[in-house]
Amino acid sequence: MAEPKDEDFLDDLEAAEAEAYAAEEEEIDGEAAELDAVIAERDAFKDKFMRALADAENARKRADKQRREAENYGGSKLARDMLPVYDNMKRAIEAMGEKTEENAALHEGIELTMRELVNVFRKHGIEPIAPEVGDRFDPNLHEAMFEAPLPGTKAGEIIQVSAEGFMLHDRLLRPAQVGVSSNPG
């Protein structure tokens, strides 16, 4: 009679296959987790790189703007300090009166000096604000030194100019000093 066959080896084979499959699955899961971690790390580095690039671009733009402002407005303190020189030269020209033979050289010298000062101002972006009597008062460009009711004028009209104002490029360096009419009608 024949001996019954031992089928345990088939169970052992299935168990061995299951163990091998589980080991491969663990290895694949480990590799997938490692790949996910590497992808997450890459994304984090990419984000940091993009932020650093944006920060560098912003710093470059900010430095460029600051350079332009320093170039245009860096001399504003010196320019403001030179305005009384302009005012005094203008007063000297007005006080000299008529040009005569005796004062012709002095008159010409002061006028040439004044012209040179105005040319230097223009070269550096300083432009005068010269309102006229009858112009409308603009608080952005003018400083009201006084208000007075003057017959024949409207409220807010300039009735006297005490001192010219000046602009440095697009900034007000000194407002023009004016007297303003306060007529109610």
Image (spheres, grey):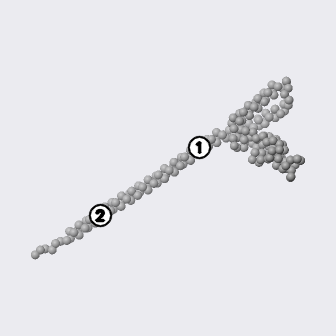
SS category of the residue bearing label 1: helix
| Quadrant assignment, res 75 | top right
Amino acid type, callout 1: Ala
Question: In the image, 57: left or right of 140?
Answer: left
Name the residue that disc number 2 marks: 21
Please report whichever mark, 1 or 2, sits nearer to the chain's N-terminal start. Answer: 2
Distance from disc 1 to disc 2, alpha carbons, whole Å, reads 62 Å
Evaluate if marks 1 and 2 touch, with contact meaning CB atoms under 8 Å apart: no
State whether residue 135 is above or below residue 111: below
Specify whether residue 163 is in view: yes
Answer few, some or many: residues within 10 Å of disc 2's Cα (few below 14, many 20 plus, some between 14 and 19): few
**Residue placed under numbered mark 1 in the picture:** 63
At which x and y percent is residue 179?
Answer: 83, 45
SS at badge 2: helix
Q: Position of residue 160 (x, y in %)?
A: 84, 43
**Disc 1: CA contacts within 10 A as few (<14), some (14-19) or many (>=20):** few
In the picture, the disc for residue 18 is none
Residue found at the very far left of the displayed protein: 1
* Image quarter in which the N terminus is found: bottom left
Q: Is residue 50 left or right of residue 7?
A: right
For this orientation, the residue located farthest to the top is: 101
Q: Which percent across, then down, holds residue 80?
A: 73, 39
Q: Residue at x 69, y 35 (%)?
A: 123
Q: Residue 155, how many percent across, how many down?
A: 84, 50
